[in-house]
Image (tube, helix red, strand yellow):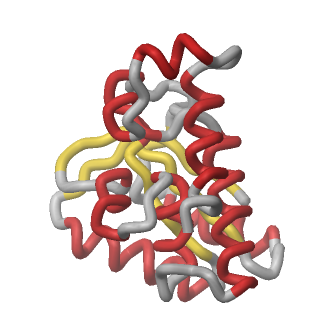
């Protein structure tokens, strides 16, 4: 798994998503772009990818495409339309683009990242999330935040893990 993070301007969402799909098809990888405001850490996406792959292997996936299943897990939501809020939209955004080869081929992942560099102005963003947006999106209140030893990042990781339990 590789992450490409930075900023991008999406003038036409369908065209941007088609570019991601084209890169994925050309390299045999899964490519999914996330609004960086909702990504609390690289571990957040690693756990989501692990859980999505496990669901697919078990035949318990809700999405036909691996990238969409990944998005659902990262969002902690079974409803695809609700998970899409964590994806990109039109306008200028900080993004995290996850690239993963299902076969583990690092060369394919590197090639995909290179192809995507034309569409993302690189700058480090994981961990620079919008705490208010994350709390609202994952429905994390003060009482829950105060009750845990960790912080917001750990609660989001728990949401990702708990999606399996909610099935």
List x then y, in percent, for residue 60: 62, 82
Left or right of 145? Residue 18 is left
Above or below 25: residue 164: above
Where does the image place residue 102, in percent across and percent down from the top left? 74, 78
Q: Nearer the viewer, residue 14 or 140?
A: 140
Residue at point 57% right, 78% down?
66
Q: Nearer the viewer, residue 141 or 136?
A: 141
In-image side of 90 versus 72 (left or right): left
For the residue pair 148 and 48, the one nearer the viewer reads as 148
Q: Position of residue 125 (x, y in %)?
A: 51, 32
In the rendered image, the residue lying farthest to the top is 146
Whether residue 2 sits left or right of residue 132 in the image: it is right
Q: Residue at position x 57%, y 58% from top? A: 163
Q: Please say if 98 is above or below 20.
A: above
Instruction: State which quadrant residue 119 falls in.
Output: bottom left
How many numbered markers are drawn? 0
Quarter of the image for the N terminus: give it. Answer: bottom right
Query: Image point 34% across, 23% down: which residue?
Result: 132
Q: Position of residue 83 (x, y in %)?
A: 37, 59
Screen quadrant of the C terminus:
bottom right
Q: Residue at x 66, y 88 (%)?
A: 59
Q: In the picture shown, does residue 92 fall above or below 60?
A: above
Q: Is residue 14 above or below residue 141?
A: below
């Amino acid at each position: 798994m590789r992450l490409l993070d930075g900023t991008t301007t999406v003038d036409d969402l369908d065209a941007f998503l088609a570019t991601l799909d084209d890169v994925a098809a050309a390299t045999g990888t899964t490519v999914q772009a996330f609004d960086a405001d909702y990504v609390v850490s690289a571990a957040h996406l690693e756990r989501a990818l692990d859980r999505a792959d496990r669901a697919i292997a078990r035949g318990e996936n809700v999405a036909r495409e691996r990238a969409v299943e990944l998005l659902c897990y990262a969002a902690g939501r079974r409803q695809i339309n609700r998970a899409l809020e964590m994806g990109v939209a039109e306008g200028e955004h900080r993004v995290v683009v996850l690239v993963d080869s299902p076969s583990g081929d690092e060369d394919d992942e590197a090639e995909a990242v290179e192809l995507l560099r034309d569409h993302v102005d690189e700058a480090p963003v994981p961990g620079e999330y919008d705490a208010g947006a994350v709390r609202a999106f994952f429905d994390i209140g003060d009482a829950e935040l105060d009750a845990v030893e960790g912080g917001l990042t750990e609660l989001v990781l728990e949401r990702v893990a708990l999606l399996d339990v909610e099935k």
